[in-house]
Amino acid sequence: MTHGSSSPRTIGVEGLSRVEGEGSLRVVVHDGQVTDVALEIFEPPRYFEAMLVGRHFTEAPDITARICGICPVAYQMSACAAMEDACGVTVDADVTSLRRLLYCGEWIQSHALHVYFLHAPDFLGYADAVELAEHDRATVERGLAIKRTGNLLMETIGGRAVHPVNVRVGGFYSAPDPAAVAALADPLRRAREDALATVEWVSGLEFPDVTGDYRFVALTEPGRYAVEGGRPSSSDGLNVSPGEFARLVVEEHVERSTALHARLGGHDEYLTGPLARYALNSSVLSPLAAEAAAAAGLGPVCTNPFQSIVVRAVELVFACDEALSLVDAYEPPDPPAAEMIPRAGTGTGATEAPRGLLFHHYEIDEEGTILNARIVPPTSQNQITIEADLRRVAQDGLDLSDDDLQWRCEQAVRNHDPCISCAAHFLDVNVVRD
Amino acid sequence: MSADIGTEATVGTRAPEARVRASRRPTLAVWKFASCDGCQLSLLDCEDELLALTGAVEIAQFTELSRATASGPYDVSLVEGSITTAADVARIREVRASSGMLITIGACATAGGIQGLRNFAASGEYAATVYAHPEYIASLDTSTPISAHVKVDYELHGCPIDRHQLLEVLIATLAGRRPVVPGYSVCQECKGRGTVCLLVAHGTACLGPVTRAGCGALCPAIGRGCFGCFGPADTTNTASLAAQLGRNGAQPLEVARLFRTFNSGAPAFRDESIAQGGAVPVAVGGPVSRFRHGEGP
């Protein structure tokens, strides 16, 4: 096959698979140069920000959970944090610890899903994990076992794995029984072993030699890997409150994609997610997770997007390890939730969804009625950077056949675990065709 | 909605055995419309059964799981999500035409979902609230269940669905029998697990008496009133419940909000929310664009 003619070579994937939600990608090559790339999102708009207006502030966690069935806890936690900020309430340390434990469950199930089901098959040349299981059933069963433990954690703390019911603004409806929490320790120990095996497995995969020039943005907290709170920080020195961050992030509505494109200060693109968290927080990983990262050959920063699978596996070790510590130290919060008295004002909440920083910003009145809502999911923030990756990967892969280049481009998108259902709280697409 | 769509708007009541052929491994397709992915994730959450399931059926189309696709027709289609665009009106008809059994899963597919709240708003209002450029948006003003557009053979309710119920429906469909899925209310599940009635004992606002069982009565067990994830039970008396909630001190707006969430398009819940005078206010443009462009607050 020759690609030197003057007619454009177009690589297109109409229904992007193994991502959450509905999207497509398109790469146009002209005279040996990538001239256009687009991650297009045709997930239908659902208008969450409009639906929230007029609702009571206590309803935001359950309504926004429905933005994403893969990371409902992230939505619940960011909504709670924003409402507590608006009401001027700081929750007790025991509530924070229980939130962190629940969140570890979501990281475990979501990362296990991504590593084993959505991402690894690319590196091994399989269409999916079912095909992988036909060749290596034990590996897929290990991934399922880790995922099951994440779901067990969410069911024990949150009541169920998809759209947990125990979360409320201020804390929880009920503090889980200490015996039920203690019973999580054994499965978590097994999951931690499986997570260590996962790091070893994925670090042996073959990675294209690609380096991204990223501005990383993640939450940071003194002394620990930020999950359920912290200050938005960047690899070029930003360190601000969630409210200040919300003011810095400008989203642009462009015609050809219906996802909003987010930039810092209106001009700087950035990347959130595992690579960003790891770059800004690898020094405060648990010792076991840090050891696993070193053994896998990761330095303090990883800029190869294909190696995000290794970073996710390291975060799996961390999440299991952290959950075990929290289980050991569990004190049922009493009361399980802080009293919430609404006051007129605004609040911002930022937490680390499995696929990156998620922030909510609300304005409420003195009755607690929501007047305005703004929800910025990680995929909107990452979209410009994902497209930059796509351009780089396509340019580097021009010698590949169309089929292989298409697969490589799909992989470049899946590297960032985009959640199109999340990004699509308002989209529709006008696809531009040459 | 046009008349011809209306005549198709039926949900089958016969046992689902008929169209699944037994001579080869049946094919299963999973389709997504407007939704959160949570119900199809429930299939992947069947960790203990997933590899057995993929041995028993050929997964011919499941975008979230696989980049491989096989063309139809499909013996069984699972459909998640509601219809919110003109393109999806056409797509669901294609799915119907290529499917033997068509089973809808979750509140979006069976009742229009949380995004069905737009059905109560003025035309175009939601798009104007969220977008800087609503003119780029080509979505419908309504979010409707799959059964408003094509014939549906079985509906599995829940926001999210229960994965054990999903397995039961799949197993029953493959075995050619009717799924055993309860149509009674959450109250029976509370009684079954010995949970003291929150509504009676504490006056807590609870939709349990009119909500379909299936979750296992999770919320009352943690001291929280049921908020209706599974939609209306087979028989309901929503007016009686609403009156009781009022006697317990709930304002009509609160009662309306309770009925108007994930299953607000289900007739029993929709009608009661309207009876409570519950026009949930929606926004009108300006302030959101202020946030959007980083100028406020």
Image (cartoon, coloured by chain):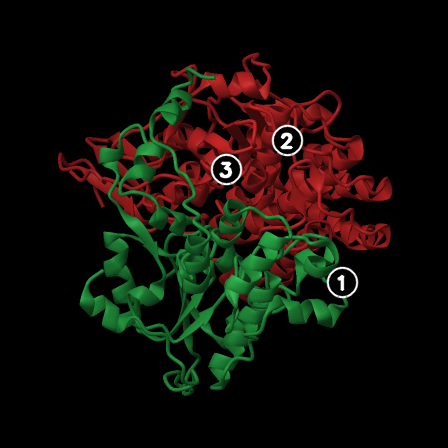
Q: Nearer the viewer, mark 1 or mark 2?
A: 1
Given the image, on which type of amino acid does mark 2 rest? Leu
What label sits on residue A306 in the rendered view?
Answer: 3
Residue A14 visible: no
At x 85%, y 50%, the residue is A178
Query: How far is the residue under mark 3 from the one under mark 1?
Result: 53 Å
Query: How far is the residue under mark 1 from the one under mark 2?
Result: 54 Å
Residue A50, compared with residue A349, is above or below; it is below
Secondary structure beneath label 3: helix
Q: Residue furthest front?
A: B247
How crowded pointer 3 is (Cα within 10 Å; few <14, some 14-19, many 20+) is rated as: many
Looking at the picture, tell me which residue is in the foreground, A196 or A181: A181
Q: Which residue is mark 1?
A: B196
Left or right of A21: which side holds A124? right
Q: Nearer the viewer, mark 3 or mark 1?
A: 1
Query: How far is the residue under mark 2 from the one under mark 3?
Result: 13 Å
Q: Earlier in the sequence, mark 2 or mark 3?
A: 2
Residue A434, compared with residue A177, is above or below; it is above
At x 24%, y 53%, the residue is B87
Q: Position of residue B34 (x, y in %)?
A: 38, 52
Looking at the picture, tell me which residue is in the foreground, A232 or A317: A232
What is chain A's hue in the picture? red
Given the image, on which type of amino acid does mark 1 rest? Val
Q: Which residue is mark 2?
A: A298
Given the image, on which type of amino acid does mark 3 rest? Phe
Left or right of A17: which side holds A417? right
> Do the residues under discs 3 and 1 have CB atoms within 8 angstroms?
no
Q: Position of residue A414 (x, y in %)?
A: 45, 43
Discs 1 and 2 share one subunit: no
How crowded pointer 1 is (Cα within 10 Å; few <14, some 14-19, many 20+) is rated as: some
What is chain B's hue in the picture? green
